[in-house]
Amino acid sequence: MEKFDILKKIVKECSEKNGIAEYELYYSENAGIRAETFRDEISAFSSSVGGDLLYRCIVNGKLGYASTQYLDETEMEKLVARAMENASVIEKDEEAIIYGGADPEEYRKVPECTFTMPSAALIRERAMKNRDLLYAADAQIADGTASGASAGMSRTFLFNSNGLDLSSFTGNSGEFFRVVLDNGEEKQTGGESLPNGFDKPDSERIEKINEAITKARAKFGAGTVKSGKYNVVFQNDQMEAILSTFLSAFYADNVQKGLSLLKGKVGEKIAADCITITDDPFSEDNTVQIPFDGEGVPTRCKNVVENGVLKTFLYNLMTAKKDGVETTGNASRGSASIGTRVFTFYINKGEMTREELLKKADNGIYVTAMKGFHAGANAVTGDFSIESEGFILENGEIGAPVKSFTVAGNFFDLLKQISDVDNELDFGGPGGTRIVAPDVLVPGMSVAGE
C-alpha cells in the first residue's frame, strides 16, 4: 500500500529524531459485508471497513505503544510522542521485545490471494437467491429458515527498525443455510455452509440444503436415554467444539499464569496414542495462509501433541523468552497487546472409516449436537457437563434420535480415553482460524438421561 510506505518513512524519521533505536509500525485493515434473510426479506445486513495503525517503541527498556485510525502524515509525530509518553509510565518489569528479524528464506511463500471483495448488492442478491432455493427445497420448510452470504478481506503491513518490512492480503466468502422443518407435530433444525462459493453452480447449494434438511428430518421423534456409562462417538463438529473450548490450555501465557493443567508436562503423555494435534498456517484446505504472525515471526507447521505426547506449547516472543525457548510463531495482535492464536489447529485423522468407528461403538451413543459450553465447561480444570442430542447406536448402526441428555467428563481425561478416530476431516467454512477434528470414540463415558 503506497500510503503505508509514506507513513513508515515519516515514522522512521520521527523515531530517529527522538533517539528511539527500536520501534515497530503495524497496520491492519479489514472489510466485511454480511446479509441474512428471514421469510421474504433481508433481516440483517452489515457492512464495515476499518483500519488501525499501531506504533510500538522501546524507551529506557520499557515498551510504549500508541494507535490511531487517522492515516494522515501530520498524525505520525503525535503517534510517536504518545507512545514515548506511554513508555514513561509503564511499570511492568517484563523485558520489552521488538522482533529482530529472520532470514527472508524463512518466510514461506504463500499462494497469491486474488480475492476481489464483492459488492454489497451482490451479497444481498446471493442471500435472497439462497432463500428462494431453501423454500423450494421441501414442503415442510417453516418460518425460522434462514440463509446468508458474507465476504471479508484483510490487509496487514509490518515494518520495524530491525529490518522487517512485511505484508499479507487475505480474503474469503461464505454462505450458510439454516433449515427449520415442521411436520405438524414438532419443529427441528439443520444447517450447512458453503465456503467461497459465489461463483459455484446452484447445484452445489442445493446439495448443501438437502444435507441440512436430512439433518433436521432425522431429529423428528427424538426420545430419551437412561443414565449410565456409554461408548460415546462425538461427531466431528462436536469434537471441534470441545477442542475449541479448551484450546487455551495449550497457550504458553495461560500455562505461565497457572491457568492450564498442562504446566510442566511437555514431553509427557497427555493423550492416547491415536491423538496427534497439529497447528498449520499453510494448510492446503484453508484459503487463508499466513507467512508471519502478529510480531513478524515466520510461521511454521508444528505438532503440538504427537502420538499422545505433548511436544510444545504455543508461544509468542514474550512467553517464549520466559520459558527460554524459541517462539512457535503464534503471536496474535490486538489494538495494543500481543496474545496467542492458532491457524488451522486440528486433530489428525486416523485410518478407520466412520462406519467402522460406529460399529466399534456397538450399542453406544452418537453425539451430534451439544449446547451451553459457555456455562457447562471450565477451561482451566477441563471439567464439562453439556446438554446434548444425537442418536442411539444399535449394534454399531445409527438408530433412533435422542435428546435432553447430558454428557459429562474432563477434557484432559478425555484426550487419554479416546480409543479411535476416523479418517474424515472437514475443513469447510470460510478461511481464517479453524479448529478441526474427526469423529472420535470415547468408551465408557458418563451420560445422564432419564
Image (cartoon, grey):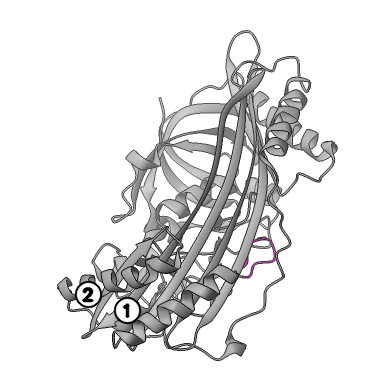
Q: Residue at x 42, y 86 (%)?
A: 161
Left or right: 100 with respect to 428?
left
The span shown in magenta is 282-289
Q: Marks 2 and 1, how far apart in space?
A: 8 Å
Position of 446 relative to 127 (above/below): below
Rendered view: 298 above or below 191: below
Instruction: Provide the residue designation for mark 1.
Output: 57
Q: Which mark is residue 87?
A: 2
Residue 290 visible here = no
**Label 1 environment density (alpha carbons within 10 Å; few <14, some 14–19, many ≥20):** many
Direction top: furthest residue: 184
Helix, strand, or loop for circle 1?
strand
Residue 407: x %, y % from top left: 42, 40
Q: Position of residue 111 (x, y in %)?
A: 72, 70
Q: Residue at x 28, y 73 (%)?
A: 81
348 is higher (above) or lower (below) than 242: below
CB atoms at circles 2 and 1 under 8 Å apart? yes
**Please, what is the three-letter code of the amino acid marked with disc 2?**
Ala
- Please name the predominant secondary structure of the magenta segment in the image: loop
Q: Residues within 10 Å of mark 2 (few under 14, many from 20)?
A: many
Q: Earlier in the sequence, mark 2 or mark 1?
A: 1
Q: Quadrant of the N terminus?
A: bottom right
